[in-house]
């Protein structure tokens, strides 16, 4: 049984078909890439999987269960965590609180226990705190623990987002252009980091990426989208030379696509 | 850590007990003149109101402009109990319970207002709360049994500095425990980014219910204290003007801050007392202050900051 199985997913924004008949099977432990030019519908697919947008057509199964209509907090507490193309941290809150919030659904106390500061509350808070502390250390964020997230440099904010996603011990991690805005050497570090956390947290990962380099380095399987349509899928080595891909993505203006990825700044008002 | 925090916690408890003793002794001993005691009681009641509104507006980032509605419901519910239901002789002892019932009545209304907040935010929710405030006022004005527009009287004067102080302490304690828990962090996450909160597993609907419930409860308690201080209430006491006062206190003292609430309530109450000679013009000060604050200092004096003794302490389960 695949960990995630998407069939016939279609999504329209008004007259615009952003995703068209998209299907995907991801097995436990795989690292699947989702690539395509800007506006191809990649982020929309993440928004549909994580419940930000209501699915109007198609089905999403996770661990064999139909999660198509689940509210997003239930999907994420069910083990699907994600990061965002344009970072979405809780900006005024401390880095520690940001990370702890990632574990919200796992806290084992109710409102009254919190009010009464019961033993159970203290045990749970301490456990969560320790987990957050060790993740902060793991991502070299410990010195920032008490700082408001908005004060952190860009790269650190990306790592906070990852720590926040991982504290809930997800099985499936959705990464939306984690290398956006990074230079070559930062991207290299990121590739290493993704490989490490995949092993350490036994993750299955779907990665949206613009930079071919990153995809070839990381993914076992790649799907290529263009204007909402799946135009190719296969191992990254094959994809690179696929004529449709060259035409739609790299061939169109390969160099431009690379440059755009370096400074990808999504438009306002979009959930990305 | 346990050894570090233990003294801090017990120091706060000690200070609270001391405060309660003072609140009991000082007015009786005649050291404080009755006028000062009166002002202190208003400061305390306003502290409770400000803490209550700050939970929704400051911590959760919604914009309720109708909190006087909750206060009014609490005031009338508590007054009905002491005037009609309970034997007079019982009321001094039953007073805490009376206030709790007033708070619970307001909390029910809080639940009702919470539901629209599932679907709307910002301006629209502000309009919903405004409408709620006006509905409460109109209903009270049309209820002849509780005096209609003339108001309701006959309450014994049960509110004293001791009870006010006790309820301020209870409110701070409860809200502090809420704020420094997953629930409180989740409530602030709603303010920061509701979509991202949902995507990190925060059940935002449940938290909105909790926030409105708790906030309305304390506004209701403050209403009960207010009614048994004045011994007379009418629907106009709980109009949008009262709600505006609460907004001023929150945005003056500081959003998302317990310390800010205490500070805002104190400054505003004293200021309004000092401005008493201005007569009716005094009522321009509040709204004007609100506009100026919104433009020049929208977070207030203590916005998102906290006095040291009110900050989170590291919990240690091993004791
Ligand atoms: N919230 C939205 N409302 C309207 N149109 C949207 C929204 N989000 C995305 N789109 C449109 O859908 C298409 C796909 O967008 P997106 O999924 O963000 O692409 P990608 O992530 O592949 O760059 C684009 O044409 C985009 O403008
Ligand atoms: Mg995108």
Image (cartoon, rainbow, N blue to C red):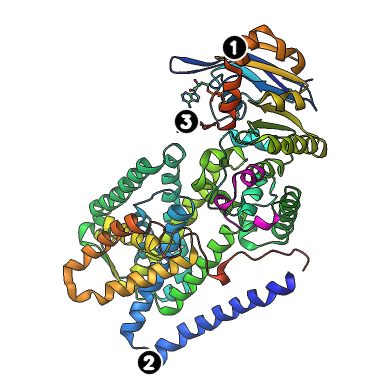
Residue range of the region highlighted in magenta in the rendering: A142-160
SS of the residue under disc 2: loop
Identify the residue at image location x=43%, y=48%.
Answer: B62
The furthest residue to the top: A243
Q: Where does label 1 land, which residue?
A: A248
Q: Which residue is mark 2?
A: B30
Q: Quadrant of the N terminus of chain A?
A: top right
Q: Is residue A153 above or below residue A55?
A: below
User: Helix or strand or loop: what does disc 1 sit on?
Assistant: helix
* Pick the front one: A83 or A243: A243
Rounded to the nearest whole Å, what is the CA distance between mark 3 and mark 1? 22 Å
Residue underneath mark 3? A267
Q: Please rate how many residues cluster around mark 2, counting C-alpha atoms within 10 Å: few if below 14, some from 14 to 19, many from 20.
A: few
Q: Is mark 3 within 8 Å of ligand 1?
A: yes
Q: Quadrant of residue B36?
A: bottom left
From the image, state whether disc 2 or disc 1 is nearer to you.
Answer: 1
User: Are there few (<14), some (14-19), or many (20+) residues within 10 Å of tag 3?
Assistant: few
Q: CA distance from mark 3 to mark 2?
A: 67 Å
- In the rendered image, residue B10, in percent from the top left (x then y), is placed at 64, 77
């Amino acid at each position: 049984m695949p960990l995630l199985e998407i069939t016939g997913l279609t999504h329209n924004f008004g007259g615009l078909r952003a995703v068209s008949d998209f299907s995907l099977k991801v097995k436990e432990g795989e690292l699947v890439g989702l690539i395509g030019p800007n506006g191809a519908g990649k982020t929309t697919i993440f928004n549909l999987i994580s419940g930000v947008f209501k699915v109007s057509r198609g089905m999403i199964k996770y661990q064999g269960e139909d999660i198509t209509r689940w509210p997003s907090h239930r999907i994420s507490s069910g083990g699907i965590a994600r990061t965002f193309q344009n970072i979405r941290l809780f900006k005024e809150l401390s880095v520690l609180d940001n990370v702890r919030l990632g574990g919200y659904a796992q806290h084992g106390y109710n409102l009254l226990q919190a009010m009464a500061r019961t033993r159970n509350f203290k045990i749970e808070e301490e456990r969560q705190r320790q987990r957050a502390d060790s993740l902060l250390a793991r991502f070299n964020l410990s010195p920032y623990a008490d700082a408001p997230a908005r004060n952190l440099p860009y790269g650190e904010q990306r790592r906070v987002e990852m720590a926040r996603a991982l504290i809930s011990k997800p099985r499936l991690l959705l990464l939306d252009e984690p290398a956006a805005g990074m230079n070559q050497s930062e991207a290299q570090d990121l590739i290493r980091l993704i490989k490490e956390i995949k092993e350490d947290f036994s993750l299955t990962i779907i990665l949206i990426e613009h930079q071919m380099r990153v995809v070839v380095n990381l993914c076992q399987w790649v799907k290529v989208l263009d204007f909402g349509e799946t135009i190719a899928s296969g191992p990254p080595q094959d994809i690179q030379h696929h004529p449709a891909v060259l035409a739609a993505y790299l061939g169109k203006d390969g160099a431009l696509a690379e440059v755009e990825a370096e400074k990808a700044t999504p438009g306002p008002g979009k959930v990305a | 850590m346990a050894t570090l925090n233990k003294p801090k916690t017990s120091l706060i408890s000690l200070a609270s007990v001391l405060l309660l003793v003072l609140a009991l002794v000082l007015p009786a001993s005649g050291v404080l003149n009755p006028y000062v005691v009166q002002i202190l009681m208003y400061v305390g009641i306003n502290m409770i109101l400000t803490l209550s509104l700050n939970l929704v507006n400051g911590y959760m980032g919604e914009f309720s402009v109708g909190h006087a509605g909750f206060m009014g419901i609490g005031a009338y519910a508590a007054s009905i109990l002491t005037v009609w239901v309970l034997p007079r002789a019982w009321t001094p002892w039953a007073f805490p319970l009376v206030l709790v019932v007033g708070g619970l009545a307001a909390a029910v209304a809080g639940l009702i207002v919470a539901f629209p907040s599932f679907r709307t935010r910002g301006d629209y929710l502000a309009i919903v709360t405004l409408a709620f405030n006006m509905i409460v006022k109109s209903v009270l004005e049309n209820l002849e049994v509780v005096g209609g527009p003339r108001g309701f009287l006959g309450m014994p004067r049960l509110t004293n500095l001791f009870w006010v102080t006790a309820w301020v302490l209870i409110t701070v304690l409860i809200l502090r425990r809420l704020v420094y828990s997953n629930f409180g962090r989740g409530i602030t996450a709603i303010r920061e980014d509701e979509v991202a909160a949902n995507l990190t597993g925060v059940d935002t609907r449940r938290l909105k219910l909790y926030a409105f419930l708790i906030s309305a409860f304390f506004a209701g308690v403050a209403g009960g204290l207010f009614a048994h201080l004045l011994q007379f209430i009418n629907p106009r006491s709980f109009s949008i003007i009262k709600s505006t006062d609460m907004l001023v206190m929150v945005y003056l003292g500081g959003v998302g801050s317990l310390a800010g609430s205490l500070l805002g309530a104190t400054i505003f109450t004293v200021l309004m007392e000092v401005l008493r000679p201005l007569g009716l013009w005094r009522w321009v000060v509040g709204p004007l202050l609100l506009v100026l604050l919104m433009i020049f200092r929208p977070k207030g004096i203590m916005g998102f900051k906290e006095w040291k003794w009110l900050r989170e302490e590291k919990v240690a389960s091993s004791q």
